[in-house]
Amino acid sequence: MRRLPLDYAVRNLGRSRTRLLLAVIGSTLVALLTLAAGSFVRGMMMSLQSSGGEDNVIIVGTGSEESVERSEIGAKIPGLLGASIQGIKSRGSTPYLSPEVYVQLIIGPESDPERRSLAAVRGVTPAAMLVHSNVRLTEGRFPRAGEDEVMLGAMAHVRLGVPSESIAVGQSLMLEGRPWRIVGTFDASGTIMQAEVWAPLTDIKEATKRETISCVVMTLEPSQAEFGDVDYFCRSRIDLELSAMRESEYYAGLSRFFAPIRFVAWATAGLIGLGGLFGGLNTMYAAFAARVREVGMLQSLGYRRGAVVLSLVQESVIAASAGGLLACVAGLLLLDGLAVRFSMGAFGLVVDESVLLVGLGASLVLGIVGALPPAWKCLTLPIPQALKGV
């Protein structure tokens, strides 16, 4: 089959600048919205997957395996675990054993009493910096017990919906009806801890009037212990009502819990893409309707219908690809790293290779599928009628 040269399709793009502009803008919008959905899903998944350490084990109360927030275990459990389980990683005489309280509290900047929001507050000891190895102090210091001090994650201001300046080091947060001084900030390398507020364990227990803790996080020395040792201890001590799980598995469960949200994001992107496809069909129908004589002339010159369809699809794909490339540039500049809030805190949108591939794929599909129906409609006319422009 003799084909039309590629430069024929390229030259045709300049015949109507308005049509070209509409095609590129439509493809850009569809691809950009697909990128937004993909970066949202990718950012959420990466924040949850990055939150759990491979060698970390989390101990919660039986029946609370899906939510640390609901868990309650005795305050003496950390000491019992440290004395009963061999192979816990240590630095000098300090074991990697972190008792923690995890609660959701309404807090906000003291300077703006009208702005309050529900945020995750984690009561910790200095050992938390050992077991959560991806957490590093970026400014200030670790809060001291008994002095109503806190330190904030890098995205805490996003979760609270306030400017970062209003909760900078030296400012105060209103928590449980009294001010807590901000003495430090930390970075948690893209995990959900980025949006948390950390305070001394004893202070949070006193402020929330609880005697129990939520969980214990420990890090095992791979060469000396394994998860089965901790699991066996929890199962054998029925009286303690404990359950052990790998920290990575816990956050993988949370990722599955948020699967409906990811589905909604993709479904929304799909519906928007479908709307863009119909808009593209209307544009292509209008464009090809004025080119019926041209299509008839090409057939009379000996070009088969398949060759004409291929040329029209090439023309559409080039315009759609230009829009897709513009969307990828805009996504990298505007979306990558953009912080968004969700129920567990906040995370940054991620525009990586896979997300860019999805965006480009959406524009290519729009270019191919958008061109086929109107092209086929033009080609179904008999050649004499097409030459008359009927």
Image (cartoon, grey):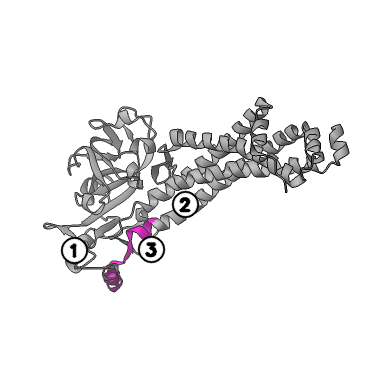
| Residue beneath disc 1 | 82
Q: Position of residue 72 (x, y in %)?
A: 31, 58
Residue 324 covered by magenta stretch: no
From the image, tell me which residue sits under label 2: 258
Q: Earlier in the sequence, mark 2 or mark 1?
A: 1
Q: Which residue is mark 3?
A: 63
Can I make out residue 328 in this image? Answer: yes
Q: Between marks 3 and 2, how big is the CA–CA gap?
A: 20 Å
Q: Nearer the viewer, mark 3 or mark 1?
A: 1
In the image, taking residue 219 as reference, residue 66 lies left or right, namely: right
In terms of image quadrants, where is residue 203? Answer: top left
Q: Is residue 37 left or right of residue 65?
A: right
The earlier-in-sequence mark between 3 and 2 is 3
Which of the two residues, 27 or 92, is positioned nearer the viewer here? 27
* Mark seen at residue 111: none
Q: Looking at the picture, how far across and down is residue 90, in whole percent? A: 16, 59
Residue located at (39% from left, 34% from top): 161
Q: Which residues make up the magenta segment?
A: 231-251
Q: Crowding near pointer 3: few (<14 within 10 Å), some, many (20+)?
A: few
Identity of the residue drawn at 29% across and 47% down: 122
Q: Amino acid at mark 2?
A: Phe
Disc 2 packing (10 Å; few <14; some 14–19; many ≥20): some
- The residue sitting at 33% across, 31% down in the picture is 164
Q: Evaluate whether residue 276 shows in this view.
A: no
Q: Earlier in the sequence, mark 3 or mark 1?
A: 3
Disc 3/disc 1 C-alpha distance (Å): 23 Å
Secondary structure at numbered mark 2: loop
Q: Nearer the viewer, residue 168 or 354?
A: 354
Specify the farthest residue to the left. Answer: 93
Say which element carries label 1. Answer: helix
> Which mark is nearer the camera, 2 or 1?
2
Residue type, mark 1 in image: Gly
